[in-house]
């Protein structure tokens, strides 16, 4: 947080950039960084690359802070677009690799329709109203220069991870 690149709109990936060694290396770099920090999603601007690429990957067995997340094997998500379905929102305690040590409550739409390309240029479309929808919205915000504290309605709900009493 504080790096100017995290406040930029990242560039679309061009057709000639799919299916390349450079892209493969970038994806590996993102995945290594994500695994190192124990994250569930990461966007290219977070490692200094201003392109519209993000990864989402999580497995319930590795995650203690949320129940009932299920598993999401690695998804490489390029040039994503989302539309909100309905106006119902939910509040969720989010964290971010670019805002280490902190968590904060953010309200976001529950249900989305999404569209994105994978690393081979194949189009994927679908709908989701679970943790994937939440993480995808957080990561797309990174591509648009938005960090989750900028979405918080009540900044008093920003807290150090260690400061939140466990129930
Ligand atoms: Zn983040």
Image (cartoon, rainbow, N blue to C red):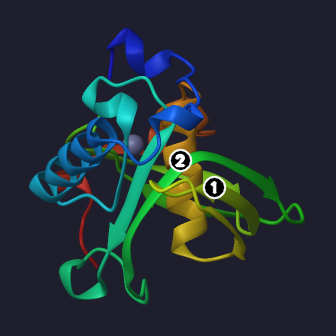
Q: Is residue 155 visible?
A: no
**Residue appearing at x 14%, y 52% in the figure:** 32
Q: Is residue 77 above or below residue 133?
A: above
Q: Position of residue 115 (x, y in %)?
A: 70, 58
**Residue appearing at x 32%, y 23% in the figure:** 1
Using the numbered discs, state the Cα–Cα distance from disc 2 to disc 1 in whole angstroms: 6 Å
Proximity of marks 2 and 1: CB atoms separated by less than 8 Å: yes
48 with respect to 84 (left or right): left
151 with respect to 6 (left or right): right
Q: Position of residue 88 (x, y in %)?
A: 82, 66
Q: Is residue 167 visible?
A: yes
Q: Which residue is mark 1?
A: 116
**Label 2, residues with CA under 10 Å away: few <14, some 14-19, many ≥20:** many
Q: Which residue is mark 2?
A: 78
Task: Assign ligand 1 to one image quadrant.
Answer: top left
Judged from the image, the secondary structure of the residue bearing numbered disc 1 is strand
Q: In which quadrant will I find the C terminus?
A: bottom left
**Label 1, residues with CA under 10 Å away: few <14, some 14-19, many ≥20:** some
């Amino acid at each position: 947080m504080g790096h100017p690149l995290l406040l930029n709109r990242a560039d679309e990936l061009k057709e000639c950039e799919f299916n390349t060694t450079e892209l493969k290396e970038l994806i590996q770099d993102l995945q290594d960084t994500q695994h190192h920090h124990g994250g569930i999603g990461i966007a290219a601007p977070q490692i200094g690359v201003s392109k519209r690429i993000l990864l989402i990957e999580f497995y319930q067995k590795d995650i203690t802070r949320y129940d009932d997340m299920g598993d999401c094997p690695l998804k490489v998500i390029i040039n994503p677009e989302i539309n909100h379905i309905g106006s119902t929102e939910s509040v969720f305690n989010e964290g971010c690799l670019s805002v280490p040590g902190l968590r904060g409550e953010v309200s976001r739409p529950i249900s989305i329709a999404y569209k994105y390309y994978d690393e081979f240029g194949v189009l994927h479309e679908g709908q989701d109203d679970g943790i994937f929808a939440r993480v995808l919205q957080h990561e797309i915000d990174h591509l648009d220069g938005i960090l989750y504290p900028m979405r918080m309605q009540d900044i008093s709900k920003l807290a150090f991870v260690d400061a939140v009493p466990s129930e």
